[in-house]
Image (tube, grey):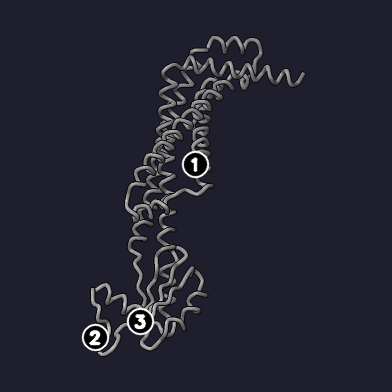
Amino acid sequence: MGVLRLLTKSDYLLRETLLGLRRGGWMNWAAVSTVTVLLFLFGVSLQASWQMEGLLHQFGSQLEISVYLDTGIQAKDLQPIMAAMPGVTGVTAISKEESWTSLMHEMGLSDIEGATEQLDGNPLVDELRVKAADSDTVPVLATKLNQIQGVDHVQYVDEAVKRLAQLSRGLNWVSIGMTTVLSLTAIAVVTTTIRLIVMARRREIEVMQLVGATTTWIYLPFILQGLALGIVGAIVAWGLITGLQKFIQDLLAQQPEFIQFLTNGMQLSASESLLLPLALLGLGLFVGLIGSLFAVRRFTTR
């Protein structure tokens, strides 16, 4: 008996929700379009924020600190000390002989011994290339490395990482502001849509009130209509984002290796790929719920 009653109520809510959406007409399209634009831009900005963080991590893991040693200090002696430091993922030792040979080859000189004799010996020093765990630890790690006895000086390029970090923070603030404004707009459109549907069924509502129907039972289908608008907007937005992702991936696959290196750093993780559609659905449901509650609140408080 309880199951039958539940099925009857569910059937009633489904029919009333679909009937209300049908009566919404073109206002439904306006609401869905507004929610879709909101969720599409929100999804793109959220994905871009995650990709920027991945790119920062990629740069951080690839960024090497060049540590130049004092004359007479061998790289292999300091390599274990630096490898044991926190924030270090790898240390490569390069002797001054290897550096000198590489330099001569880059300059196109084949007579390495003759060039060495003209300069009264190899003028270079041993070098250690230290790979950092992430970009945020690079400046602190470089300072610690410079304090090790036997180190002459360190060099690292962090300007690009700083620019990317600033861009990431700016993107986050722009995303928050844009999402807030568009959410308010979408809520206003959903509210107007549901309110028009309520007004179109005003006589039916009055009859239900006369026969003793509760306020919750009367206005629950309208709330479900708002949620339905949010769900449809989320589905459409996710489809557009997926199509955009595929287009960009196909485009970047034809680019040089450096661009592909950047692309690898911008790949979403499995958890982020799952969280993105859930975030779209959650925001869509929130907008639909708040909009419909605002719409029915005006009539329930009379």
Q: Position of residue 21 (x, y in %)?
A: 50, 18
The residue under label 3 is which amino acid type?
Lys
Mark 3 residue element: helix
| Disc 1 packing (10 Å; few <14; some 14–19; many ≥20) | some
Residue matched to label 3: 96
Cβ atoms at labels 1 and 3 below 8 Å apart = no
Labelled pair 2, 3 in contact (Cβ < 8 Å): no
Residue under the image location 53 percent in, 42 percent down: 274
As drawn, which residue projects farthest toward the front?
110
Quadrant position of the N terminus in the picture:
top right
N-term mark: 2 or 1: 2
Looking at this view, is 297 or 19 the one in front? 19
According to the picture, the residue beneath numbered tag 2 turns out to be 114
Three-letter amino acid code at the position of disc 1: Leu
As measured in the structure, the alpha-carbon distance from the residue carrying label 2 to the one carrying label 3 is 17 Å
Looking at the picture, does residue 22 appear above or below residue 166? Answer: above
Q: Earlier in the sequence, mark 2 or mark 3?
A: 3
Residue furthest toward the right? 1
Please give the count of numbered marks on the rendered protein. Answer: 3
Q: Residue at x 44, y 68 (%)?
A: 131
Mark 1 lies on a secondary structure that is helix
Of residue 204 and residue 287, the one placed in the foreground of this image is 287
Determine crowd level at label 2: few under 14, some 14-19, many 20+ residues with C-alpha closer than 10 A: few
Mark 2 vs mark 1, CA separation in Å: 62 Å
Q: Amino acid at mark 2?
A: Gly
Determine which residue is flagged by label 1: 276
